[in-house]
Image (spheres, coloured by chain):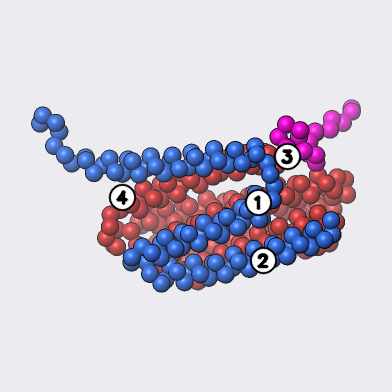
Amino acid sequence: MEHDVTKTVRLYMAVFGGLLALTIVTVWAASWETATGLGVVLALLIASTKGTLVAGFFMHLFSDRFPLIARVLVFSAVFFVVMVVLVFLGFVDSFGANRAPIGG
Amino acid sequence: MAEIEIPYNSTNHPDTGVYNAKLGIWLFLASEVLFFGALFSSYILLRVGAGGTAGDWPLGADLLNVPLATFNTVVLISSSMTMVMSWASLKSGNFDAFQRYFGATIGLALLFLLVKGLEYYAEIFHQRYPSTSTFLATYYTMTGIHALHIIFGVAVNAYHFVSAKRLYAEEPERFTNRIEVAGLYWHFVDLVWIFLFPVLYLL
């Protein structure tokens, strides 16, 4: 048990170091190039990586195997994606708002 | 009057595979994903709808204090680290280390709030109010709601900190689980900031 905790603490330290390094890289990437959109994509990719590290290691999602919790989270993720897609569909649909009415 | 024992607060429920509080916090966090998801979704709509020219949606770095926000990001990540270390300390039976790490978590959270308050003060000093622009309205709404989550987390952690000795002495395993549950909430709040920071300050 003691050995396991020591190993886990070492893992947490490594994750912590990774999170700090990625924070610096995020700031650097955003200042590097935002005009082309590459900086935007890079900054969001780094943020997603950091989020995965926190959820996976600090919240134990990688080590705990609980199918019920996984199902709950997948359900939330699906609803989130639907929410974003609906917003985009609404935006794309507004392109046709200025068209002349049919038969008018 | 006979005491009624609440089942599955330190042992896993045979049907769910987790103790009840852990299932409860994950269900709550799932609802929080949707809550913050709605805010991020609104942000995307407002930003995309603002048009392509730079003047329609300002660059966060031009209005907000990026070095201060970067410092706050480091503070919050550090508090997540001390939080997980406090739980690991309890798991290895080291109560003194738990108190040190848990106290540091609360201290770092208060530091985050102080820096956030300074940021708000600077924005308001420069007459940048929520009513000034859609960007600032979005900024104040998202960071304000996040700060409220931090305040709630500090309150929960402070309760556990002051009653730690008693709770740990009564039921050590249940207390360890309580800290894990409080930690799951805390890491989620950290996770939300990890996305808020680049979205509002850098892009």
Q: Which chain is blue?
A: A
Number of other residues with Cα within 10 Å of mark 3, as a class: few under 14, some 14 to 19, many 20 or more: many
Q: Amino acid at mark 3?
A: Val
Q: Amino acid at mark 4?
A: Gly
Viewer-side label of 3, 4 = 3
Residue at image mark 4? B49
Spot occupied by residue B148 in the image (x, y as percentages of width and height): 57, 51
Give the position of the C terminus of chain A as an image quadrant.
top left
Name chain B's colour: red
Number of other residues with Cα within 10 Å of mark 4, as a class: few under 14, some 14 to 19, many 20 or more: some
Residue at image mark 3? B18
Give the position of the N terminus of chain A as an image quadrant.
bottom right
Single out the residue that lies furthest toward the left: A104
The CA span between labels 3 and 1 is 15 Å
The CA span between labels 3 and 4 is 44 Å
Residue at image mark 1? A62
